[in-house]
Amino acid sequence: MAMIRALQLLADRQVELVEREPPAPPAPDQVQLRVRAVGLNHIDVWGFRGMAFAKRLYPISVGAEAACEIIAVGAAVTNVKPGDRVVPYSALTCGVCASCLRGRDNLCENPSGVRGFHINGFAQDITNHPARLVVKIPATVSMHDAACVAVAYSTVEHMLFDNAQLEPAEWVLVHAGGSGIGSIAIRIAKSIGCTVITTVGSADKAARATALGADHVINYREDRFEGIVRKLTRKKGVDVVFEHTGADTWAGSLLSMKRGGRLVTCGATSGPTASLNLMQLFQQQYRIVGSFGAPLSALARGLDRIASGVKPVIDTVYPLADFRAGLGRLESRDVFGKILVEL
């Protein structure tokens, strides 16, 4: 078989497109995937900077989120076949611990790592993957849209429904509405009838967030968002805060919540450290939930959302050779929606 392309991180902040030997035929429980598109996320930025939170060996192929086509299956595989389009789950979970057996894959007790972060990722033409960790793409869902599911859609599904237990007609504050997960959260929350307030950092993003369906858009560079939220809710506060920006918005997020409100957080892009007023926490009966990754079931739910018409916003699609430009765009926050890399 001919050589394949792979986008590899050779050292911290040093990425290069190389040619390498193709993988061996799939093991009995594996599928062989032709990767069609890769979605970029802040986990890629962290990995590029060397923030892997675990030892890893260089070089390592990047890319944690992908849409693929199956080109071969192992002898024991029965759930998929060659020609099927699939989204691979990026965490290599054990499948046998108590958490995995309960469908809480992202709490796996014996994971082998996250692809593109600890171990070789999907930014390569062909790769092998466990057959139990792929989800079929519905016929009506494009490869570009499917490439937003394994990390972005599943993260939002897990945050809003598994953790925050968002219900129709509730008020939700979505931070960074122009980000990949922020834009998806707006669309999903609106699709079930919620009132959405979102924060953005520019007039252009404010206009685009409004067009996306947000009911109220706050430019956090011009106004203190928590004050506007209190006015909009008549001092009551929102039911749910979708938090992923970290230190800069933490205090204001707590002030934006109603009594008994829920805050769910999955990120800390503006800093990992914040203070917490414990009296405020228990007197207001807040529920604060940390959310990392998502269970495998969230991928299927995300694909179903897209099939029903709740599609992602695609900011830019780059060729594989321009991965670094896409990563730079993501780092600069000069983005509205998802950035993809096409193979």
Image (tube, rainbow, N blue to C red):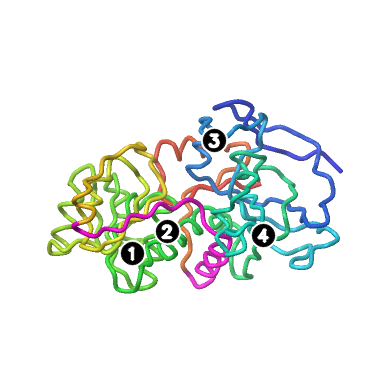
Instruction: Specify start and end residues of the magenta stretch as a single range.
Output: 283-309
From the viewer's perspective, is the residue at label 3 or at label 4 nearer? 3
Q: Which residue is mark 4?
A: 134
Q: Is residue 103 above or below residue 129?
A: below
Q: Measure the alpha-carbon separation of dots 2 and 1.
A: 20 Å
Q: Residues within 10 Å of mark 4 (few under 14, many from 20)?
A: many
Which residue does the image show at 84% across and 49% down from the upper left? Answer: 25
Q: Which residue is mark 2?
A: 159
Verify whether residue 224 appears in magenta: no
Please name the amino acid that badge 4 sits on.
Answer: Val
Which badge, 4 or 1, comes first in the chain's sequence? 4
Image coordinates for residue 277, horizontal then vertical, percent: 21, 46
Name the mark on residue 213: 1
Residue in front for this viewpoint, 295 or 151: 295
Which badge, 1 or 3, comes first in the chain's sequence? 3
Q: Measure the alpha-carbon separation of dots 4 and 1.
A: 31 Å
Image coordinates for residue 45, horizontal then vertical, percent: 50, 37
Q: In screen coordinates, is 58 left or right of 258?
A: right
Mark 2 residue element? helix
From the viewer's perspective, is the residue at label 2 or at label 1 nearer? 2
Please name the amino acid that badge 1 sits on.
Answer: Gly
Tell me the quadrant of the picture where the N terminus can be found.
top right
Q: Which residue is mark 3?
A: 52
Q: Measure the alpha-carbon separation of dots 2 and 4.
A: 21 Å
